[in-house]
Amino acid sequence: MARTRRCTGAWLREGALALALTFAGCAGPNLWTDLGSVSTANSNRGRLRAPSRLPLHGTGFRVPPRWKERGFQYGTDELVAAVRRAAARVHASDRRATLGVADFSRDRGGSSKWHNSHHSGRDVDLLFYTTDAKGKPLPPPEHDMITFDDDGKPYVGKRDKDGYHDPAWAERRFDVRRNWELIEALLTDPSVRVQWVFVSDGLKASMLSWARRKGRPRAIIEHADMVMRQPADSLPHDNHFHVRVYCSRADRFHGCIDRGPVWQHEKKSFKYDGPERYDPVTWRRLASEELALWRTSSQRAR
Ligand SMILES: [Zn+2]
């Protein structure tokens, strides 16, 4: 720790040459000895070092062939672990539920022809959970991101000019319950702090109203209401979730940069950048306690 601080001081005092030398002699090894993944710079102009790789299948999730071929299964340790835990949690309440995981980042991050962001291992695209008309969970499509209207019915959207590969696409319905459970699992995961879940306004509204109707914890509903967003500058996000997490504390030290808003409950963690006294997990722990209480009371009710 002390060595690290001295290095940071040198960075500030000396000019560009010293910066280069310091990088080679000090920050470099520090970066090498960081045993975890490192996300650097922005999500739209960054890189990824020593990432975790999501396996192609595991408990409650699968990478369908279209995304397997691209090979974008690399993310920060925290995000990959959180997605695995969230999929496992949804699967635990219904063994038929399988999350389709599309792209994280390339093995070293950086740009690609498919994404503006996804540069630094802190973005992931997740296919929606779907059911048949009777409510039975269906496996994720192999090659399609299916577009859903505000009522959760599928249609061939503008970007799907050639239709879908999936022969059963017209029978699929947006699975409000499991999609909500996924969001809830990500928001209460202790290893990540979610900045955005991009999704269309209509699908967001249907998940929130389901959650309210079922009496899900209020803190989580409010949190979800804040982070779920239809981006103003793009097509409706109605064929998958795009999840972005904030830089981890350790990665911020290595040059990871967050763009956009810092939500109220995250503010202190930014103010005390570096050696933080504020524990950004506290909020989520409180939310989880509320969730545990909810679970106990709903079990009793059964
Ligand atoms: Zn995306």
Image (cartoon, rainbow, N blue to C red):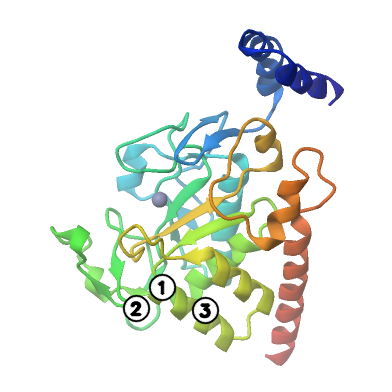
Q: Is mark 2 within 8 Å of ligand 1?
A: no
Q: Position of residue 187 (x, y in %)?
A: 62, 62
What's the mark number on residue 150? 2
Tell me what residue is drawn at x 66 percent, y 23 percent: 31
Q: Nearer the viewer, residue 90 or 208?
A: 208
Residue under circle 1? 201
Q: Amino acid at mark 2?
A: Asp
Tell me what residue is drawn at x 41 percent, y 39 percent: 72
Report, in whole angstroms, how far the alpha carbon at label 2 lies from the one at label 3: 13 Å
> Of the residues tagged 2 and 1, which is closer to the observer?
1
Q: Amino acid at mark 3?
A: Leu
Question: Are the residues tagged 2 and 1 within 8 Å (C-beta)?
Answer: yes
- How would you rate the neighbour count of disc 1 (Cα within 10 Å): few for under 14, some for 14-19, many for 20 or more? some
- How would you rate the neighbour count of disc 2 (Cα within 10 Å): few for under 14, some for 14-19, many for 20 or more? some
Query: With 293 as the anchor, is 128 left or right in this view?
Result: left
In the displayed structure, 49 sits above or below 217; it is above
Q: How many marks?
A: 3
Q: Position of residue 215 (x, y in %)?
A: 63, 85
Q: Amino acid at mark 1?
A: Asp
In the displayed structure, 216 sits above or below 100; it is below
Tell me what residue is drawn at x 54 percent, y 55 percent: 59
Secondary-structure class at tag 1: helix
